[in-house]
Amino acid sequence: MDAATLTYDTLRFSEFEEFPQTEEPVWILGRESSALTGMHILPFSSRVQHCVPESSAQRRIGTVRCFCGGIQNKWESTWLIYTAAAHTNFPFYIHLTFCKSTEKDDILCDISSRLWFTYRKNFPPIGGTGPTSDTGWGCMLRCGQMILGEALVFRHLGRDWRWVKGKRQREEYYSILNAFIDKKDSYYSIHQIAQMGVGEGKSIGQWYGPNTVAQVLKKLSVFDSWSRLAVHVAMDNTVVIEEIKRLCMPWLDYAGAAAFLDPDLERELNGFTEGACAPDQSAVWKPLVLLIPLRLGLSEINEAYIETLKKCFMLPQSLGVIGGKPNSAHYFIGYVGEELIYLDPHTTQPSVEPCDDGLVPDDSYHCEHPPCRMHIRELDPSIAVGFFCSTEEDFDDWCLRIRKMSERREALPMFELVDRQPSHFMSSDVLNLTPDFSDSDRLERFFDSEDEEFEILSL
């Protein structure tokens, strides 16, 4: 079966490989965890069944253990058998209950809380007369939805938010889901992405590369007045700090001093409390979604970039990576050892209709089986790395971390971070453009190319 059309529907649940117990740390979108299992004793008051005077001599004469908790083996019950004194044969018992503590459950909960966008069928025709399913061609579009959906979760719910099956979530969560519902008027629906891709030279039903989907998401984000994201696609393997700050703080004049803020506006901004969606943050700094399309080799990934790629998952600003294998896209959210952890869009599910109250049946938007893994050397070299910076301080911290990574000799940088636009870049003055959403997009598209034509990085 063609990898591009492989679906989980063709597999039995029992064939999914369990998440490994390993000494290697597990990194998921900037968070480190351990998959190893440990034991700890429950509070003493819950386990003493019989006791003797403290003055009595005690001698342990045996142990009996019981295991309970089903397939999870949540706890281990242990009876320690003692005698009351060395000269007596009448035993007493102390019941110890050991709780099996593991971060594995937390890891799986974290992964299942990521938005999982897959192939869908029976949605309204794209463009009115187009396809009603994206099976076989929409995997990269779905991966683009996942990486942007993660940015919206970070923006409105925070990195620590967790999805609980059957539990009513915050209203912001349902607003995020509604932005991706498969219908033409949702901000980031398959309909919007496919039709916007026509302007990028991709016909509806044609497979996208990471660069194309990044450019399309940037265009669509302009219409999302609720999230007010600043989506920047860094081209030519170069991230220009000045360009990003100009995009996220458009009132600052980077040719000279900062523009003067109206005192009333400044007082108004300072009056809001801090929060993920507070107007002060979005007014002072538009939350940044930074997407960096890269090609890290010719037909396979250059091993010199592997450690650098791993470290990208360790950054607290990480949104993961979109890429995969030829004609088979995945959304990579972390790694363990030499294996990448990813969400796979290659399963076809029925389209979902929101309820009248705006709530969305959400079970199919979260992956509840063990996550997929693949060796990092199997990764196709054409990828796009994503980061989210909610504040200017967050972006400055990201810049500092990237520069420290670049100073390490054992790993080769995947991209360059510079303060100002390099001289070989054409300035906006030459093109008579101003750095707002629409015009900066035209500027970047001036240098853009097809996904197969990235500059090749090498030693």
Image: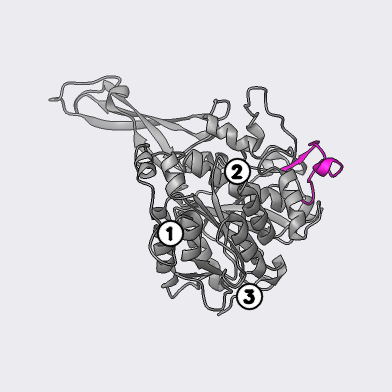
Numbered disc in front, either 3 or 1 = 1
Using a 10 Å C-alpha cutoff, classify the residue at mark 3 as few (fewer than 14 neighbours), some (14 to 19) or many (20 or more): few
Q: Disc 1 on helix, strand or loop?
A: helix
**Residue positioned 53% across, 41% down in the render:** 153
Numbered disc in front, either 2 or 3 = 2
Its colouring scheme is one colour
Using a 10 Å C-alpha cutoff, classify the residue at mark 1 as few (fewer than 14 neighbours), some (14 to 19) or many (20 or more): some
What's the distance in space between the residues labelled 3 and 1, CA to CA?
A: 24 Å
Q: Nearer the viewer, residue 23 or 255?
A: 255
Counting from the top left corner in percent of width and height, residue 54 is at: 15, 25
Residue for badge 2: 224
* Residue occupying the far left of the picture: 55
Tag 1: amino acid: Trp
Counting from the top left corner in percent of width and height, residue 442 is at: 65, 62
Q: Nearer the viewer, residue 434 or 116?
A: 434
Residue for badge 3: 456
Tag 2: amino acid: Asp
Task: Describe residue 256's horizontal placement relative to residue 184 as left or right.
Answer: left
Task: Describe residue 390's horizontal placement relative to residue 85 as left or right.
Answer: right
Q: Disc 3 on helix, strand or loop?
A: loop
Q: Is residue 351 magenta?
A: no
Q: For residue 398, which numbered disc appears in the image?
A: 1
What span is in magenta?
Answer: 119-138
Task: Describe residue 99's horizontal placement relative to residue 455 as left or right.
Answer: left
Image height of 87 relative to 294, above or below: above
Using a 10 Å C-alpha cutoff, classify the residue at mark 2 as few (fewer than 14 neighbours), some (14 to 19) or many (20 or more): few
Q: Earlier in the sequence, mark 3 or mark 1?
A: 1
Q: Disc 2 on helix, strand or loop?
A: loop
Q: Earlier in the sequence, mark 2 or mark 3?
A: 2
